[in-house]
Amino acid sequence: MNILIIGGTGIISSAVMELLAAQNHSLYMLNRGLHSRSFHKAVIPLVCDINDEKNVKELIRGLFFDCVIDFTIQLPSEIRRDYEYFQDSTRQFIFISSSSVYRRPLSCYQVTESTPVYNPYWDYAQNKLACEEELQTLYRTCNFPMTIVRPGHTYNETWLPLCISGAKGCWTVIRRILEEKPTIIPGDGSSLWSVTNHRDFARALSGLIGNPQAIGETVNISSDEVLTWNQIYHTIADTLGVPLHPFYVSSMFLDQAGPYGLKRCLTGERTQSIVFQNDKLKRLSPGFRAEIPFAAGIRQSLEYLLAHPEEQIEDVVFDQWCDALVDSLTKAAKELKEQFPNYE
């Protein structure tokens, strides 16, 4: 198949690129060419800013794709832009949305594609939903052959599945675990969650590409493995060979006590139990199942991260904030206990 990927260097899209290239498709990648990642020699680069209408149209002139996948879209205007580019030049257009679009709080922890949507806490989720609605309108009114994909929490070798981290990635949390410092976990760590290795996501997506049954559909992609946040963090610590020292803090307090706007991703996504149902994915892609359990996937990720110092980006502010938060709450608890030594 002739496949165009817009983006191609992110957590999810890089794994998709690798898999599709290995499957001997005619694979095009359109991005600004600012990345340092090397790709399969068969990948055909189209170096351009996707918003540069003149250059994009020049690059794709005369090309027809079996599938276009855009990993970069954040706003409805970008859906309309891509429609103008590809309305007559693709058999399928796949939009990568987000599982964060589902309504919070959930009325049921089991989530299918028909679960009510709209997340009032997170503008990112609201924008993704607006993109979906724009694309569905184009499908209904213009017969634009679209598929919407809602990925769950996906990780790779450099972006690990943590409940919270700072602005510079996951390394500071991993280092704190290695040094046996307190690790902040929202709530009590008992809420249910699932995390998906990016290679499993890529295999799932490949079953939708060029699949006429997927046209007009919205599809969850997530691992079937269900874990608590405690299990996720303990698995990371066990893999590192150190004990975990969890420090539990309410999501509301974390949001109020720091500069990170954590209400969006905590109340708006990660701290309410959720189990994604992948029945539609398995119907559209018979035989698919996620093959990489978290214990195996996180071992691969940590081995890579520890072997590549250039990926170990320190976040001094986040580290100091964690220490200050732990110290302040520990001190407050001690003072309250001294003030109220008994309950009689």
Image (cartoon, rainbow, N blue to C red):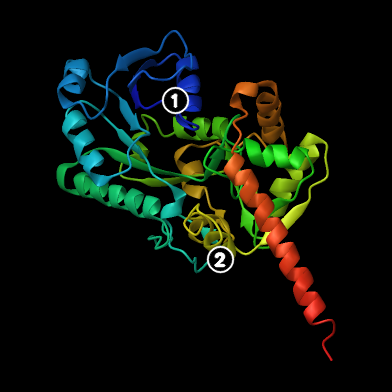
Whole-percent x, y for residue 92 in the image: 29, 32
Give me the residue at 27% from left, 20% from top: 48
- Label number found at residue 216: none
Where the C terminus falls, by quadrant? bottom right
Please identify the residue farthest to the top as the structure is shown. 41
Whole-percent x, y for residue 331 in the image: 74, 65
- Residue 330's place in the image compared with 281, above or below, is below
Give me the residue at 48% from left, 17% from top: 37
Q: Which amino acid does the dot numbered 2 rest on? A: Met
Q: Which residue is labeled 2 in the image?
A: 252
Q: How many marks?
A: 2
Where the N terminus falls, by quadrant? top left
Q: Secondary structure at mark 1?
A: loop
Give me the residue at 47% from left, 56% from top: 264
Q: Which amino acid does the dot numbered 1 rest on? A: Thr
Q: Secondary structure at mark 2?
A: helix
Tell me if mark 2 has few (under 14), some (14-19) or many (20+) residues whose alpha carbon lies within 10 angstroms of its own.
Answer: some
Name the residue nearer the viewer: 122 or 288: 122
Whole-percent x, y for residue 220 in the image: 46, 46
Name the residue nearer the viewer: 113 or 236: 236
- Residue 116's place in the image compared with 336, above or below, is above
- Label number found at residue 9: 1
Whole-percent x, y for residue 193 in the image: 61, 53
Q: Quadrant of residue 266?
A: bottom right
Q: Quadrant of residue 3?
A: top left
Residues under labels 1 and 2: Cα distance?
A: 34 Å
Q: Is residue 229 left or right of residue 8?
A: right
Mark 1 or 2 closer to N-term? 1
Q: Are marks 1 and 2 in contact (CB under 8 Å)?
A: no
